[in-house]
Image (cartoon, helix red, strand yellow):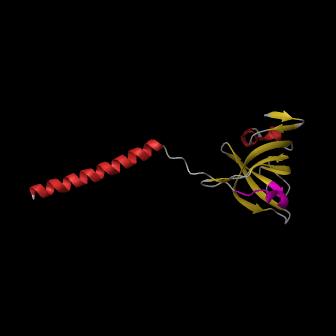
């Protein structure tokens, strides 16, 4: 982890691997919004799941901050990437069932995300594919002609 000012910049994996070190600390994390946005325990908040490098954490955000999420990560969709400054809790006692979470103080959109571009097709595969179709048709024609001659 590195520090900007007094706020440590950590990964979600850092928080999962050394939770006590950061408990109650204002941290900065960056990750992709994934899954579903869930209603919080009051009408003014929502839960956004943030994922990075295979680790995921729930982030408690205001409704206004949750509205910044325009895409949720899923198959062929890149979720909105958020930078969160918030207080990390190993076992949140603020009505959140003792869960590991971050209560966001500031949310910044790093990228909106969106539907992924289809993987580009290697031109060699197109050439080989067309060549095999032509070869298949040619062999079929040859087979039919030989069959007629014997016939």
Percent across and percent down for residue 111 are 74, 49
The magenta segment is 60-71
Residue that lies at the very extreme toward the bottom in this rendered image: 43
In the displayed structure, does residue 144 sit left or right of residue 116? left
Location of residue 101 in the rendering, given as x and y in whole percent from the top left corner: 79, 50
Question: In this image, 32 relative to 40: left or right?
Answer: left
Q: Can residue 13 be seen in this view?
A: yes
Question: In screen coordinates, is 6 left or right of 34?
Answer: right
Tell how many labels: 0
On whether residue 41 falls in the magenta region, the answer is no
Place of residue 96 in the rendered image (x, y in percent of width and height, measured from the top left): 81, 57
- Using the rendered view, name the quadrant where residue 26 is placed: top right
Q: Indicate the quadrant containing the C terminus: top left, top right, bottom left or bottom right.
A: bottom left
Q: Residue furthest right?
A: 6
Question: In the figure, is residue 59 to the left or right of 150?
Answer: right
For image coordinates 43% across by 47% down, the residue present is 126
Position of the N terminus, as image quadrant, is top right
115, 91: nearer the viewer: 115
Q: Can residue 98 be seen in this view?
A: no
Please tell me whether residue 63 belongs to the stretch shown in magenta: yes
Residue at image x 84%, y 66%?
43
Place residue 4 in its image quadrant: top right
Residue 109 percent coordinates (x, y): 79, 50
Q: Residue at point 21% right, 52% down?
A: 142
Residue 20 location, quadrant: top right
């Amino acid at each position: 982890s590195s520090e900007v000012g007094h706020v440590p910049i950590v990964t979600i994996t850092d928080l999962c691997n050394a939770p006590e070190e950061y408990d109650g600390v204002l941290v900065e994390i960056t990750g992709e919004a994934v899954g579903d946005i869930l209603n919080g325990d009051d009408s003014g908040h929502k839960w956004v799941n943030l994922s990075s490098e295979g680790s995921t954490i729930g982030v408690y955000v205001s409704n206004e901050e949750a509205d910044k999420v325009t895409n949720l990560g899923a198959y062929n969709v890149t979720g909105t990437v958020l930078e969160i400054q918030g207080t990390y809790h190993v076992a949140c006692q603020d009505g959140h069932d003792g869960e590991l979470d971050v209560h966001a103080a500031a949310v910044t959109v790093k990228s909106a995300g969106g539907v992924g571009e289809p993987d580009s097709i290697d031109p060699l595969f197109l050439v080989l594919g067309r060549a095999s179709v032509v070869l298949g048709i040619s062999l079929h024609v040859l087979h039919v002609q030989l069959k007629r001659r014997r016939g």
